[in-house]
Amino acid sequence: TKPLTYSQCISKINSEPKASRVKYLCLHVTAQALDTTHIDLIHYFLQKKDGGWSRSGYHISVQADGTCMKNLPDDTKSNGVGSAYKTTPVSNSNSLNISWIGGHKGLDMTSEQALSYKKIILAYVKKYPDIQIVGHNQIGDKSCPWFWTPQYLKNIGVKDKNIHHKSYIRNEKVPAPYNQGKYLTNAGLAANPSKLKKNTISFAINNTPNTVPDPTQTA
């Protein structure tokens, strides 16, 4: 399947019926090189991860050029949050998982990625008005998705009722490291595509480059 522009991906999202299982949307980064492709990511999940999984870890992946891949329908669970988070209400069974590709050592998200990521999140809020959105680093002690999700969501205009503010990885009296410092700074950057570098990596299928709108014109 050829990667989709964010508009095509949103059309795909909206063409699928609502899934009653969906309560949460969890935001991720793959923690791979920025030039990793959708195909590379699927190969990793199906052939390499823990000996090979039966499905993708994410419902949607967003490549550095801003193209998106709808890997699983909403009514099919992905392996995004696993079974390690039994102390949280978020699970594979009740969540959608989307990820931007890259972030091996920090926030290297491109402007094209940031735009597509934002558009997809807002599309899911529209489709599921009561959905709760959470960052992986709120339910697991890891940097993923390299920003503090509650602040990021506020920055892109998501209503407070859709923002899951609680963190489950620390005693509530001791702030997690992911809601301060660079994670707050990154939340501002990821929410504003025009502040990020444009993609310079050439991704092509059958020698035809994939293109997405200039984020400085459509953000």
Image (cartoon, helix red, strand yellow):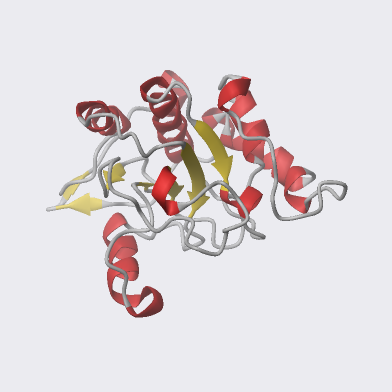
Of 147 and 65, nearer the camera is 147
Point out residue 91 in the picture as x, y percentages from the top left corner.
48, 51
Q: Looking at the picture, does residue 157 appear above or below residue 203?
A: above
Of all residues, the one furthest to the left in this rendering is 206
Total numbered badges shown on the rendered structure: 0
Residue drawn at the location 45% of the way across and 57% of the way down:
34
Q: Is residue 57 left or right of residue 43?
A: right
Residue sitting at the far right: 173
- Position of 172 with respect to 20 (left or right) is right
Foreground residue among 103 and 211: 103
In the figure, 2 relative to 158: above or below?
below
Q: What is the x, y in percent for residue 79?
A: 39, 59
The correct choice, above or below, for 143 with respect to 162 in the image is: below
- Image location (x, y in percent) of residue 40: 31, 64
Judge whether residue 158 can be spotted in this image.
Answer: yes
Horizontal and vertical percent position of residue 108 = 55, 50
The residue sitting at 36% across, 44% down in the picture is 65
User: Looking at the image, which residue is at 57% across and 29% down?
Assistant: 192
Is 12 left or right of 51, judged from the image as shown? left
Towards the viewer: 31 or 138: 138
| 143 relative to 21, above or below | below
Q: Nearer the viewer, residue 30 or 84?
A: 84
Q: Is residue 190 left or right of residue 51?
A: right
